[in-house]
Amino acid sequence: MTAAPNHRVELNDSSGDVLIAALQLWQSDIWTALPGIVQAVNLAEETVDVQVAVKMTQTDKMGVETQISVPKLIHCPIAFPSGGGFLLALPIAAGDEVLIIIASRCVDGWWDNGGEQPQLEFRMHDLSDGFVIPGIRSRPRARSGLSSANVQLRKDDGTALLEITPSGNINITTTGNVNVTAGGNAAVTATGNLDLESSATLTLQAPNISILGDVSSTGTFSNNGKAIGSTHYHTAQGATANTTTPKPP
């Protein structure tokens, strides 16, 4: 597809202007990077179909200009942040805005087989060779509440947020649940001072719970519904008699 230059040259005595117009027409066939909108997602292949978000101007022989859409780009590989055996996988979805990067040469051989491959076609800067980078936003879809100081991994609306501060603090905020699972005999280990605070109930559930060290508490401590500590007492019938079950004072 050829887009029109910024202006049409019909009759012009300046060879420089004619040359500029010719160069602009040639340059309009060189694709580099464009914003796009995801149309369909194939996570099994890590590709998307994407619509270029910038229309092209087409000029007919009479000089009439028409705004037309670029044909949908299909099977564009997604550039998720990854390396060294690790991946940040994002749930990319239809409607997401992305940046389309156009390779300067045909990438079909590499995409099909990986490794170093010959060019299957000798095309250059062609729309068939697009990669997609998620994350860019148009102004109407800009997110609010972004931090100018902290690294954030968050939902767009900020209802779930993990951030690292310049001082090294890690903050987790969410309106949902926080679940930590270690499979098999794997352990979840926290070293240092550990403060657990809940506005409702804090539950520990395991076949066996071991506490090594002194235990201090304020408030009522109960076992099987019976208070233990300063809020209950035992009675006995003699110096060698067994005490009764705990009772409230």
Image (spheres, rainbow, N blue to C red):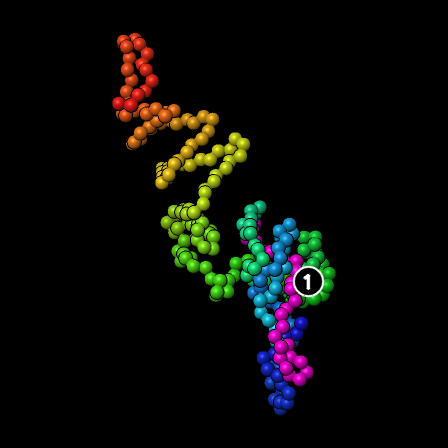
Q: Which residue sits furthest bottom? A: 13
Q: Magenta stretch: residue 66 in it?
A: yes
Q: Position of residue 202 (x, y in %)?
A: 39, 35
Residue that mark 1 sits on? 106
Instruction: Out of 124 and 69, give the one closest to the viewer.
Output: 69
At 30% from the left and 21% from the top, the residue drawn is: 247
Residue 208 visible within the image: yes
Q: Position of residue 82 (x, y in %)?
A: 56, 51
- Give the image quarter of residue 25: bottom right
Instruction: Out of 40 and 245, give the one closest to the viewer.
Output: 245
Instruction: Give the residues drawn in magenta, as a range.
Output: 58-83
Residue 225 located left or right of residue 139: left
Instruction: Out of 42 and 99, give the one closest to the viewer.
Output: 42
Residue 131 visible within the image: no
Q: Position of residue 39 (x, y in %)?
A: 61, 60
Vertical side of 11 occupied by 141: above or below: above
Residue 195 located left or right of residue 76: left
At 63% from the left and 82% from the top, the residue drawn is: 64
Amino acid under label 1? Cys
- Give the image quarter of residue 157: bottom left
- Give the image quarter of residue 26: bottom right
Residue 235 located left or right of residue 186: left
Figure quadrant of the N terminus: bottom right
Q: Secondary structure at mark 1?
A: loop
Q: Magenta stretch: residue 54 in it?
A: no
Instruction: Out of 122 and 44, give the one closest to the viewer.
Output: 44
At 70% from the left and 54% from the top, the residue drawn is: 112
